[in-house]
Image (cartoon, grey):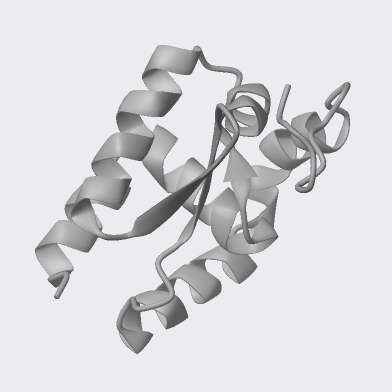
Amino acid sequence: MITPPEVFKNLADETRARATLLIANLGELCVCELMCALNESQPKISRHLAQLRGSGLLLDRRQGQWVYYRLNPDLPAWVQHMLQATLQANAAWLEENTSRLQNMDDRPVRAAACC
């Protein structure tokens, strides 16, 4: 079971916080979508996602050669509530990331291979 220090330690980093909230908002994102939304390199995004997955906050699934990330559905209710409250109260903080993602060329379709 994930503890409060683990949750807050993982979300204390801005890249991890933004990625987690974008995923919480949209349900599932692939690495290439997060690279676009966060304007960061693949190694940096993958490193942060690995940490979030290792902590139990995120789960991944492979589709071909691509990896998609989603919130762990078994997160305690308090974590889910905190993420939703944070998301609702901070839409402006994520506005630039969301806009980049919405304007992404060749955005992957879940049934097809990414990028």
* Quadrant (top left, top right, bottom left, bottom right) of the C terminus: top right
Compare residues 46 and 63 and report the one nearer the observer. Answer: 63
Say above or below: 85 vs 14.
below
Side of 17 relative to 99 (left or right): left
Residue 20, horizontal then vertical, whole percent? 47, 51
Say above or below: 76 vs 33.
below
Residue 62, horizontal then vertical, whole percent? 51, 42
Compare residues 84 and 115 and report the one nearer the observer. Answer: 115
Furthest-bottom residue in this view: 77
**Residue 12 seen anywhere in this rendered image of the structure:** no
Numbered-mark total: 0
* Quadrant (top left, top right, bottom left, bottom right) of the N terminus: bottom left
Quarter occupied by residue 77: bottom left
Residue drawn at (32%, 60%) of the image: 57
Side of 77 relative to 97 (left or right): left
Residue drawn at (39%, 18%) of the image: 44
Side of 66 relative to 110 (left or right): left
